[in-house]
Image (cartoon, rainbow, N blue to C red):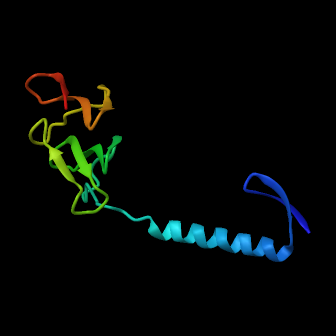
Amino acid sequence: MLLYFCDMKLKFITQTQKFTCLLIIFISCSVQLAAQRMIKNVDPKKSYEHIKKVIANDDFIFFTANDSIHGEELWRSGGTESSTYLLKDINVGINSAWNDFQGRAFIKLGNKIYFNANDGVNGDELWV
């Protein structure tokens, strides 16, 4: 008999029970690993660092990414390739809404996300 912690309680279990527990853990880990997958390749050219800031709101995540076409801009994903897309090209063209010297502040309040961004005309401003 061996001594193990199970459900935060100290218990004696047999070697057979130990094997069963290890098998269940192995299957659980294998299923979790198999379930991980890339949702979308944001920048197939691999020209830039991709995702820099991520925040969740309800059933979506919002993040900043550079796709080599629009600069670093705001993206949205619902967990599938088709639901992952550029939400808005804030600083139109190859220019980025954020730069490496400027912080990316994202705050969730209710069902909205507030953030700072630069549209190239008005400077760093509050967006929702």
Residue located at (69% from left, 74% from top): 23
* Residue 73 seen by the camera: yes
Using the image, determine if residue 19 lies above or below residue 57.
below
Q: Quadrant of the C terminus?
A: top left
Q: Position of residue 27 (x, y in %)?
A: 60, 73
Locate residue 52: give its quadrant. top left
Q: Nearer the viewer, residue 28 or 71?
A: 28
Location of residue 39 in the rendering, given as x and y in whole percent from the top left corner:
32, 61
Left or right: 14 as drawn, with respect to 33: right
Q: Is residue 104 visible?
A: no
Residue 41, horizontal then vertical, whole percent: 28, 59
Q: Residue 77 in the image: x percent, y percent?
A: 27, 53
Residue 120 or 106: which is nearer the viewer? Answer: 106
What residue lies at 79% left-to-right and 53% top-to-bottom?
A: 9
- For the point 58% across and 67% down, the residue is 29
Q: Give me the residue at 29% from left, 26% from top.
A: 102
